[in-house]
Image (cartoon, rainbow, N blue to C red):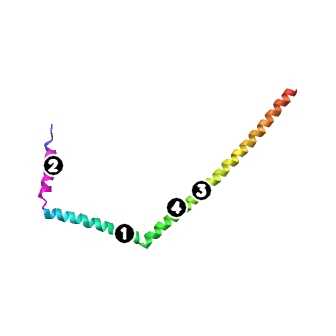
Amino acid sequence: MRRPGRAVAVFAVLALAAACSRQEQSHVSKDARDASRSAKQAVTNVRRDPEWKRAVSDVRLIGHEIAAEVRHSAAQADAAIHHLASSSDRATRVHDDHANRARHDDSDS
């Protein structure tokens, strides 16, 4: 079953669009162009604003500082991992030496 309400709504929209005069359509089109130009000019004004430029510069500086801190922390973590690995290697060698001595002592007995 078809709904007559949908067809009526589509017809109403088409009728309203056709009812708009060329002058009204031209006026709406001009308003849209003016709004676009206005928005473009506002963006240009913001980009030229010294306070905006300072804010962008501050954000860049903060980004560089954060990156330096991350690199520093990564280097510290890397050093700690290497230290832990070398400590583990030494402990393994000591353990293996003790185990070998124990086996050697047991075989002598």
> What amino acid is at disc 2?
Val
The reply to whether the C-beta atoms of the residues labelled 4 and 1 are less than 8 Å apart is no
Camera-near label (2 vs 4) is: 4
Query: Looking at the rendering, in which quadrant would you find the N terminus?
Result: top left
Instruction: Say left or right for 102 vs 13.
Output: right
Q: Which residue is mark 2?
A: 10
Per the image, the residue denoted by label 1 is: 44
Amino acid under disc 4? Gly
Specify few, some or many for label 4: CA neighbours under 10 Å numbering under 14, 14-19, or 20 or more: few
Mark 3 or mark 4: which comes first in sequence?
A: 4
Q: CA distance from mark 3 to mark 1?
A: 36 Å
- The amino acid marked with disc number 3 is Arg
**Separation of disc 1 and disc 2 at Cα?**
41 Å
Residue 13 x, y percent position in the rendering: 15, 52
Where is residue 84? Give x, y as percent.
69, 46
Q: Nearer the viewer, mark 2 or mark 3?
A: 3
Is the magenta region chiefly helix, strand or loop? helix
The CA distance from mark 2 to mark 4 is: 53 Å
In the rendering, which numbered label is found on residue 63? 4
Position of residue 58 in the picture relative to residue 44 (left or right)? right
Badge 3 density bin: few <14, some 14–19, many ≥20, Cα 10 Å: few
The secondary structure type at the circle numbered 4 is helix
Picture quarter with the C terminus? top right
The CA span between labels 2 and 3 is: 62 Å
Disc 4/disc 1 C-alpha distance (Å) = 24 Å
Q: Residue at x 84, y 28 (%)?
A: 106
Q: In the image, which disc is placed on residue 71?
A: 3
Q: Are marks 1 and 2 in contact (CB under 8 Å)?
A: no
Which quadrant of the structure image shows residue 89? Answer: top right
The residues colored magenta run 5-21
Task: Classify mark 2: helix, strand or loop.
Answer: helix
